[in-house]
Image (spheres, grey):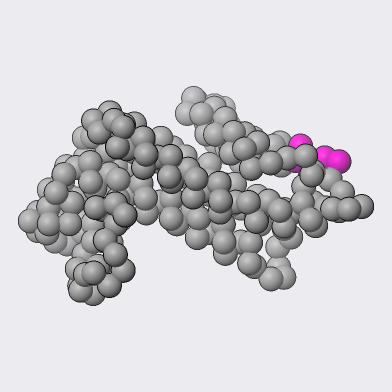
Amino acid sequence: MSATSPPAGAMRADARRNRQRLIEAALAAFAEHGADDASLDEIARRAGVGIGTLYRHFPTRQALVEAVYRSQVEALCTRAREYTGAAGGSSASEALARWLEALVAFASTKRNLTISMMSSLGGKNAEVVSSCSAMVREAVVPLLARAQQAGEIRPDVDVADLLKMSHAISVACEYPSAHTDQAQRLLTVMLDGLRSGAAPAGG
């Protein structure tokens, strides 16, 4: 277990709340200023705690970056499980589409955090990135399978295809575009392709 992810029940309730507020404040600050340039003092102020509290939870900037990264990955995986288990309402392919939208929205933050982690801690954080990527792949497997079994997504698509195409959209959206909804437009085209030729499993 990572030093930035203490065991459940290891902290008092107020300490857990402080830790979560620090992670949320750090995410906002990293989005505005970058993970390397955001002020730790400002993050502490946003979280409503003293700088000493920040350092007790996260002794280094990199520990804070890793915690933010992990929290975002865990939230993405939780969302995948929620969409997979949703009964009624949206179709299986619509649930997959919503998750892919969340993945692409997450990707720019993920990219900045990954660069920041890898820049100074090298091999150790390569392992963190690898384990988090494995978590995402595992979370989306049942979501994709549900859509394929419903005949709403073509059966020859696998998780690696989904993640590579989503990554390509994220990279493309780093460049200026005349379309303010560029990510959504590209996702729509991608999903149209994923639905092409779809047929119920065994049909």
In this rendering, position of residue 195 left or right of residue 120: right
Q: Name which residue lies at 56% across and 54% down.
A: 139
**Residue 159 position within the rendered picture, expressed as x and y whole percent measured from the top left:** 64, 42
**Residue 47 position within the rendered picture, expressed as x and y whole percent measured from the top left:** 21, 59
Q: Name which residue lies at 29% across and 64% down.
A: 7
Residue 188: quadrant of the picture: top right
Say whether residue 93 is visible: yes
Q: Is residue 57 above or below residue 14?
A: above
Q: Is residue 194 magenta?
A: yes
Image quadrant in which the N terminus is located: bottom left
**Residue 103 position within the rendered picture, expressed as x and y whole percent measured from the top left:** 53, 45
Q: Main secondary structure of the magenta part?
A: helix
Q: Name which residue lies at 84% across and 45% down.
A: 198
Q: Name which residue lies at 86% across and 41% down.
A: 197
**Residue 145 position within the rendered picture, expressed as x and y whole percent measured from the top left:** 71, 53
In this rendering, position of residue 188 left or right of residue 61: right
Q: Which residues are magenta?
A: 193-197
Of 135 and 108, the residue lying toward us: 135
